[in-house]
Image: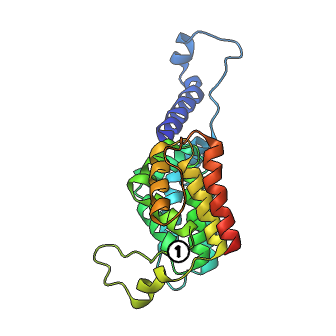
Amino acid sequence: MAGEKSLNELLKWSIENSTEADPSAAAAAPVVPNAPRTALNAEALAALMGAPSDAELMQAAVEHITSSDPEITLESKLTAFDNLEQLVESLDNANLLAKLGLWTPLLELLGHDDDQIRRMAAWCVGTAVQNNEPSQERLVALGGVEKLVRMALGDRLPMEKRAGAGEETTEESAAADREETKDVRRKAIYALSSAVRNYQPALDVAAKELRKRGEQVPEGIDATDMDAVDGIINGLKQKALNA
């Protein structure tokens, strides 16, 4: 785990740089000219300085984005989303989404009433699953592939309500009857493309969902066949462009 690695590096660095303060230890230790010392990576250095970890930053970003506080502006939420997207470019951080329980709120944001939030949610999903099998697996398990297919074909997803959050409003219920914007569709297609490449379960789900919705998708496509995957993705891009 990235956090444990950073702590280990921090501990090793601390030991190496405190040994000389103990005369007995220095006398007992063999002298190695120009012995290399452990270099601190950015996360370990942040821990030393008391800065928040990437995990804490990710949790804070999602809490900020999903907050109902009227004083938190849309611009502020989009900035937090941009920071989150950059954080999940790291495979370790992308895999933290599952460990921190952030996949569910992230996928719920695909149905947010603001199109800029939906666009950023799709962008984050696409970044998190790119060349990342554990995240691709999680996306499939949570029904995210079906959501992305619907968005890619132009359907607005309704904003989901968690248990105990009350009844869905008429406006939220009607969201699925409205068309998705082109910008959001493009990001959903990007996310779907990242999700299905080199991960057969995701491609199988996407292909099945596309066929259910009247799309002509050949049977038995191999997720490692980039030309075949490109054929599906390019077809969706063309539909979005012509919408």
Q: Which residue is the site of mark 1?
A: 155
Q: Residue at x 56, y 16 (%)?
A: 26
Residue 229 on image: x %, y %: 60, 48
Name the secondary structure under disc 1: loop
Q: If the image is split into quadrants, where does the C terminus sit? A: bottom right
Residue 5 on image: x %, y %: 51, 35
Query: How would you rate the neighbour count of disc 1 (Cα within 10 Å): few for under 14, some for 14-19, many for 20 or more?
Result: some
Q: Is residue 211 above or below residue 110?
A: above
Residue 239 on image: x %, y %: 65, 68
Q: Is residue 75 above or below residue 233?
A: below
* Number of dots carrying numbers: 1
Q: Is residue 90 left or right of residue 56?
A: right
> Observer-nearest residue: 46 or 191?
191
Can I make out residue 213 in this image?
A: yes
Badge 1 amino acid: Asp
Q: Is residue 26 above or below residue 47?
A: above
